[in-house]
Amino acid sequence: MRSWITTFTGARVDPLDLQSFDIRIEDIAHSLACINRFGGHIRRPISVAQHSVYVSRLCPPELALQGLLHDASEYILGDITKWLKETPTFALYRQAEDRAQKMIFQKFNCNEHMASEVKAADKLMVRFEAMRSGLRIDHPGYPPINKEEKERVGPWQHWGWKMAEEVFLAEFRCLQSGK
């Protein structure tokens, strides 16, 4: 039996066997705009789409598209919190996520291996979002955010899902056009 979901644009997609022709940026933007970070356990919702835009903006220009798409596999597989996802129980999920993420990167001409600068920007945003949301992360690799890092992230406001979707798509189109 094959798995499948129907996406926002009406495509019928097997998340465990994602193909390039299945991938539509409109589905990615809409889905990520509707998925909350931290499993929804924050005072005000932060969508994966908003998170991805901020990560992209923290990356060097040549890695901005990879930064924008770094969590794109979640559009088809959903989001599982980092600390749960890292457990042995979720090994098969991580394999499916890796396959989907590589397919998405290939589709949009990104290096399929996540750049260290993208990983660092993602980690900074996790810490920043936790701080903004009043969450305490008890993990040695995630110390409290300092003043310089806060300034690097820049101004912050919470976006509703529609704004997150629109900004994500606008950033994507801008990066695709090279502007």
Image (cartoon, grey):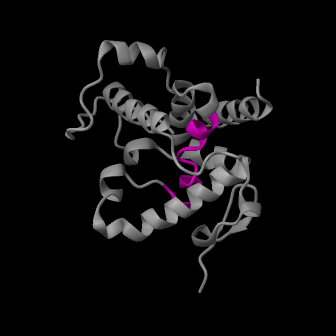
Q: Residue furthest right?
A: 177
Location of residue 76 with respect to 178 vertically, above or below: below
Residue located at (57% from left, 71% from top): 16
Q: Nearer the viewer, residue 31 or 24?
A: 24
Q: In what quadrant of the picture does the C terminus appear?
A: top right
State the image quarter where residue 45 is shown. top left
State the image quarter where residue 148 is shown. top left
Q: Is residue 157 left or right of residue 143?
A: right
Tally the marks. 0
Residue located at (21% from left, 41% from top): 139
Q: Is residue 24 left or right of residue 59?
A: right
Q: Is residue 87 left or right of residue 95?
A: left
Magenta segment range?
A: 64-78
Residue located at (76% from left, 34% from top): 173
Location of residue 8 with respect to 40 vertically, above or below: below
- The percent position of residue 4, horizontal first and vertical second, equals 63, 73
State the image quarter where residue 131 is shown. top left
Q: Nearer the viewer, residue 123 or 5?
A: 123
Residue located at (65% from left, 66% from top): 18
- The percent position of residue 144, horizontal first and vertical second, equals 25, 26
- The percent position of residue 115, horizontal first and vertical second, equals 50, 40
Asked whether residue 163 appears in the rendered view, the answer is no
Name the chief secondary structure element in magenta.
helix
Q: Nearer the viewer, residue 106 or 173?
A: 106
